Image (tube, grey):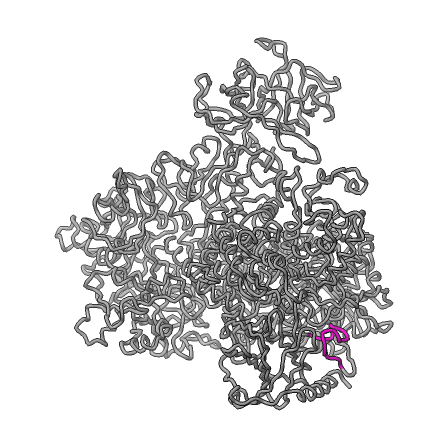
Amino acid sequence: MTMKSSLLALLALLSLLLLATVPVPVSSEEHTAWSGNVRGSVQGRRSMAAEEPSVSVSANKNASANAAAAKILQFTCPAVGSNPIQLPEDTSLTQVAYKIPRALSNTLCLLVKVSVTSTGTAHTPPLLPTSLTSISKSSDYDLIPLARSYSGWDWSLSSGIIAETTWIKIRCRDAPRHCNVRVEREDPVITPHAYYLMTLSHSQPLGLTSEEIKSRFLNQVTFGATREEMTMLQTKYNIGVNIDNGTANQGMVMYLSHQMNPLFTPITSHREYYRSRVNFDMKWNGIEGSNIAPQHPCDAFSRWIGYSVTGHDYGLQFKMTTISSGSMAGKLLMSVLQGGKWTPRTIMDSFADTKDAISGPGNYAFCYSHGSALGEEVAFRRISPPSGCATKIEGGNPPLVLPAEYWNDGDGVAITGIHLPDLSSGFEFIAGQWTMHRQRMSTGESYRMYNSIHTESASQVKCNALTMSNANYKHLLGILPDGNHVQYNAYAAVEHNTPDDPITDGGVRAKGMGMRNCANVNKNDWNIDSCRLSTSSACVSSAINSSGKIDTNVVICGSPGEISNERNIPYTDIDTIDQNTMAHYFDSAGGPLFGLHTWQKSNLFNNIALYSEDQLRQRMGWALSQILVVTQFQIDNSDLSTEFFLHYHDIFVRNAFGNYFDILKEVSYSPMMGEMLSFLGSQSASYTKRVENRDGRPDENYAREIMQLFSVGIWRLNMDGSKVTDRDGNFIPTYDNTDIQNYARAWTGFNRQNRRANFEGYWHTVNRIDPMGIYGPKRDPFPKTNLIGGYIGDKYPLCTNNPKLHFLKKGAEYRLLGGHDMPETTYEPNSWSGNENLKRFELEPGGALYRQLCNEDYMTGACKYPPRVVLTENLTCDNDECTMDNFRIVQVGAGIHYEYIPSACVFMAFGYGEKMQKVRDRKKQTMCLHEKVDNAAMSSCCPINPAIAIHRCEYTAERTSFATSVERCKFDPDSPVIGAGTMCDGFPNAPTQIGSECSFNAGGDYMDWHWSLPSNSTSPKPIGERCVQQAKIDVNGNVAIVHAPDMTNTPDDINVFEPVDEENSNYFKVQWMKKDKLYPGPDATTGKCNPAYPCTLANDGSCLCTVDIFEKRSWSGKRFRDLVSTNKISKMKKRLMVGALSPDTYPGDYYARDTEFPEGGRVQIYHYLKGSGDPPDKRYTRNAIIGIRPSDSDGDSMDDYKWFMNFRSLVKIGTNFVFRNPPHFMSLAMPDSRDAHQETEAVLKSYFHHPNTAPFVAQRIMQRFGFSNPSPRFVFEAAEAFKSGTYVKLGVTFGDGKYGNMGAMLAAILLDHEARDPIVDADPTSGSLREPFLKLLSFMRSMDFKPSSRATAIRFENIQAAIGQAPYVIPNVFSFFLPEYQAPGQIQRTGLKSPEAQVMNAPTIVGFLNGLLSMLDVGLSDCYSGFGGRTVWNCAGFEKGWFSDFDDYNHGSIKYEPTGGSTATGAAVVDELVTLLLGGRVDDTVRATIAAEYENFTDKEKAKLYAQKMMLGLPEFHSSNVVLRDHATARAEAPAPVASANPYKAIIFLNLHGGMDGFNMLVPNCPDQFKDYQDARGEIALLNRDLLTIQTTGQADCNTYGLHPKLTGLRDLYNEKSLSFIANLGILQEPVTKSDWRKKSGATALFAHNTQTEETAAVDIFDEYAGVGVGGRILDAMFAKNFKPGAVSVSGSAPPVVAKSSPLLVVDPSGYEEFDPVPFGTRMTDHFKNANPSTTVGSGLFSETYSKSLFQSLSENALLFAKYNAVKLTNTFPATHVGRAMGSIAKLIQTKDDRGVDRDVFFAQKEGFDTHFDIEVPLQNLFQELDDGLSKFAKELKDKGLWDDVTVICVSEFGRTLMGNTGNGSDHAWGGNYFVMGGGVDGGKILGEYPTDLSNNSPLVFSPGIVLPTTPWESVWSAVSEWFGVTDPAEIAKILPNKDKFTGLWDAADIFKPGSFGAEEAASKNTEQNIFAEMYA
């Protein structure tokens, strides 16, 4: 009997038995109606009924129609510890419904589906769990929770994709008695299963103690519970009083409220924490290049030293000469050679070494050791004759003695002296803190001033007047009253320059100290409101002038966190890596406080996390930093950067409880993000073509990742986080590649702000601090679509609808420029700055606008000049203001200027024909422009000579509307007949011409347009001379704009503006209005345009069509009133796409409010008064303005209306085709940065307001707070709080009521009963694996870690490598782990996510435990695999008793002492540790066992250490589950491996992650084909002369190819026929063509890293064998043939090699680490194993996953530590990632007998192939590393005779675009070129089909150069499987379940040499399966 049939028989029997006990059906009044899907419909309600209600069961064949008629049978949830109840299923029904009670308090009731796993043992009959303990083997079954109730709360869906995708509906009655749960029945023949009700309790069945509840709470909201905080919770917040195990109490609510309020809990800024401690000794010869200045000598805390030799003198020459005259005649002058000049340093009575071997005058050099105090040793050497550095100056470091008469005895070096007060009164002596530098102890000695000195009458130079220009600080001496001298010792002076308190002079004084740049920050959205006008001379902002200009009336602004350093702290706090060369970098060393520079930022984070008060804020910041990732691996010189990263992280700290939009915006403007995701420098295709004359597309990197990772995600979501499906049950993607390309155009034009000073770096260090600017001309100017069927510019007002005098209307903005008269958001030539001939519009005093901008001080009458003014009401115009169309800059008073910033508005892509006029520019270009546009073109009048045009203006470069231009020219004062003047088509002539102050020669990338008429025209726009627009339609329905202005009487050298001429290739997506979505593009087959349409074929193959533009009213009066009366506002808004200004911005006679709708109501309408006499319904004209009050999801104030015009603008082509006229922000004529910023704001809002964002962000944050799989109800609650911006708990309100509030959402998460009720921990699917970094910090916090006196701060080194996680060393943009990652085995099978499992493997498990075991035994150091840096030369000193006090030789240690001290019992200690570290989640048996062992120790210190170590071995510490241990059954051990007699083979899956650019790896090198390649690739093409030539046969039209020049080793392997390339390979669902690829690729999300990485790992596109990789299935097939497989990774988690038959062995290629290496501590291996016995059904899945991984790790470690390290390689592998990985694999292959395997599949991965930007150098480096590593690997295996047994397969998730982007990188694509290599490979071939045409016209290529794959990965793996030994077609079909979709798949003979493959049989039957394989099944 089969297992399946046995299960069916048993199910039937159990059903009959159970039905026999079911009560009689209840009456129909108990029936309930079913409604709707559960998504978001069920709110949590709680019943505390004392009496448990009965349960009923209902089954219905057609539930949707007959639910009410069904009979309901009743059951009862089992008692805690009782057998589960199997729920019957009637096989005649399609759905079953169960009436189930709510669970009682402190219990959890689960509806679960139990199914037999594919690896389950075939019992006869099969065993099903009838109790929690009576099962044969837990791995035989998958327990999948579908729904649950706990502690009286309603039933709700459980977590996980299986519960999510199972058809389940839940409805609970209002009365607290029961809920109905309805499930679609599965066929038990297809899926053997049974449904059960089971009841679970916590490991503490009576509930947690108040202390345990407090600890559990703190461990969720902080970096770890401490006893001090638990006491504080009790005393301050009364947590523990009247506490309820299931809910949050008032104390918890108030604690969170206070943590979120900076008034109660001040914010700890990481940047401020760092800057305040910066205090290093600056090297003098580098000050001129520094980005910061030294302390001024006369400032308080300036430093002075009384000794002569400093650390900066290392390596310098010095000479001793005898003084011949003066007061010191006969003594010796020491002069030091600095900067090529001998400089007097001090005078000595005599000079000799300590051994008297050297003495007297001579030439010497300083050596390594310089004492930093008088008398300390100074090493030196003699130059001639040479001596070693063992010599020391007799008497040590000499005092500084240098009378003024000898100051000029050098080579003209100027020495300055100032008189100082007596040391005893004006200074304090500082004994520097002990610091460790290479284990040498030294003390610093200096003097610092108590107070600043401003006047010394006897000084040679007044101290406060000292600058670099009048005093050489390198040689500044202080003269003391007693005649002695001290030397000025410059320390860093980091200035205070925050937004609220900017540096008053912008950095003038610091510049005088040698700093190159100004410190003044450019104005931006984050500091503008706190900028101010300087009261004296100040440095001009870098945004205006980067050379450091000093001026008056300067606007000074600051930067968040840019505080000054505390200059009175000891100098040892932060130092530099090399004071001789890198002193200008704060971070270039890290110094003693925070460790080596690479880890300085990470260790600073650790200190804040451990000791800051704002724990919740810091936890939230840490969570956000893992979502919106910036990684140091993609930032240049990141190892020399601290402040840049801290400033970026502070975005999350500042905004932790603010609005997510603010986070998203600040991240998007961060130069760090711009650099990492490569949109910094990206530019539009039109700019690239017009200015640089090359093709290119905008970089897609950020456009993709901001959607996928930061905002909306890949799949559309319901509010409860579940995925939206179509009618066929398929998930619906949120966006596609077209959307990415569309949004990429919006992320163009970004650039860094100019360099400035006052942050870390050199003067030439790029600015990675200040928000990026946008250069308007580089921004793509064309329309962009959003993700919901509209455009980014939807709902914004039209610029052409702006009212007259809009600069005086409500909402108009003015920004202070101060004395600077150049605009900052619009363009004017730099040469105009300060030009007195410029004409600026000056406001008259007393005018309304003047008064607003002046903002007069009512006491002094002086203008206060606010930094930004936004008009809150309409103002009246004054004199000349009344004739203006527009303002650029206005002058207010004496030399103060403001820039006008219009409100955001948009242009229609296609203007109305009669409204379009022609404009011309100085560069002989012309285009069309709407006549109402008033900010782009100037007037051009010809009053005297038609060939000489004159600009008429009120201010320089004034732009006007067409009508104003006509009027200006008509009444031109120079016209012979006033009132008859005309416009003309000329251009202003000489600069001296009349009106020259108006002319505008923009130059550069800007056009200087003027309104134009034919020169013989006397009236505007003669009939027939329309400025026509056309549309080009491509084959996909995308549109490009073409302007066709009338060229009559236009000179021949005038051309249409290139971005809109007939060759325009800037296509954008439009919304075609017809239901069939047809469009008049070229025929996909013939390429012709339909002659029935008004279109002709354009040069690029598109159809150039005539268009008509018209407006259509959105709503009639009747329909409008119907929608209002039925409250269908959402439907109303769907047609309102054109925004409007508030009606009150227009003159009073324009609009009147319709009183039919109540004032202040949700909807208002204002009618256009021009039609006031019409019947009421006809007043709903297109010009009507409709106002709608936003809902909470709109994110705007509920008091404000959104205003819309009552029309839609449509574009019509012929009679059949219509699309909505697309709006766009950027003016084609004047692309200003102002408009680009406004467009960016709109783009960000399109992400932010997307329906996905609330549940997406909620889920991501929940995961980082320990909820890997929050229930749908839980997600819904959190998403609702995000959406509403408010969460109320126990009368306390969180949030500000605005959509996107993070504080409200976080409170909803942390205070929800799913978070607060401990019984939820008993749900096996709840909680998570804990992040390793949080585990580490929580242990240190809870166990009272304290830095040692020598360290004063936490200093880790490289914990990322040890534990898999550390701040600022995130591997890539996907963070440490993927949010959707599923651990192989039961977690994957039950559909759960376990992100943290991705970094949980043997190296990180062992590394984590070793690091903490070492910390417990010897403190923080690098000894015994510790986390710290080097503290001693020989770690044996700890063991051998050399160190009496370990704290003298570490950087800190655990200081935990049990409450009660030495009298505490073992039970009390264990309870306290379990409380602090585990929140009480350990059963009493475990506690008692540890306590008993504790009592066995006579040494209570060792007993305490043992108990602490045992906490680390408990699975509860590593997860948040409850563990149900079977204490009687030990967990099985893996059997000892036995060497196999079978022949050995290995496959290496080498993943080049990021998308390897295979078209620059393998290049066609025949003349025609290479030209084709160059044309396709453009700037990123390789040069022909650099290629490494190879020959091939079989390709269609070229047999000569070239390799990248760095691939010499691969070239050699190819030529020796051990390597073949595979052309155009990719993931395919089935064969595709250019016309059907979208339809035939729906099973996967193409072009995304994570999805395509999964696909290449699995090669199982329909997930038939989900969770098992393609390499794993090959291993399983070989296991079935009695071979012994091994799955091995040298790169962490390895989905491609996950198998059912073999556990995954993970090896760290940097070395194999022994577990628990401390020789004198309690050895913990057996203790840890005993703490992880077998578990019973219902035990936590996350804890079980950890326990299995721990056992596997310990077993592997015991087996391989010695064996692996004993292997010796004959070749030296490169010290690179690939080199180490391939070297490690070479060693592992040689351990095959020790591991007992005969078939291995290895996984190795190299990151970095995501080459979006400047591809050339990165790809060179990557290919060089790849080539070097593989070449050494091949040679090693050849030397060992193993080369023929190994095949290496190069894999990447996708290829890259042929066309480069504008940043000279390439973007995500599809088909790519790869290679396979090995001794068995029949090489020297290019397999597959290299495309014969690489242009977008190719049948295999679509824009922008994406190649359709022609060879599926199935072909490669089919051949490789056969070579490996899998020959059975049925087994091949299992390995490649989608193979039947393809024909002609390769077999082994297509890739491999004859004789290298064939049928193989194992020598013996494989009877043993590795016990650990079950976790991967």
Q: Nearer the viewer, residue 1239 or 1399?
A: 1399
| Count of marks overlaid on the render | 0
In the picture, measured across the screen, residue 1587 lies left or right of residue 497, that is right
Residue positioned 63% across, 44% down in the render: 1354
Residue 127: give x, y in percent of width and height: 75, 80
Magenta highlight: main SS: loop
Q: Residue furthest left?
A: 977
In the picture, measured across the screen, residue 1565 lies left or right of residue 1761, that is left
Q: Is residue 1592 visible?
A: no
| Figure quadrant of residue 1632 | bottom right
Residue 129: give x, y in percent of width and height: 72, 77
Where does the N terminus fall, quadrant-wise?
bottom right
Residue 990: give x, y in percent of width and height: 27, 44
| 1271, above or below 672, in the image | below
Q: Is residue 228 visible?
A: yes
Q: Nearer the viewer, residue 72 or 807?
A: 72
In the picture, measured across the screen, residue 283 lies left or right of residue 1679, that is left
In the picture, measured across the screen, residue 533 lies left or right of residue 738, that is left
The magenta stretch is: 126-142
Residue 1626: give x, y in percent of width and height: 62, 68
Residue positioned 41% across, 79% down in the render: 1075
Q: Nearer the viewer, residue 1337 or 18?
A: 18
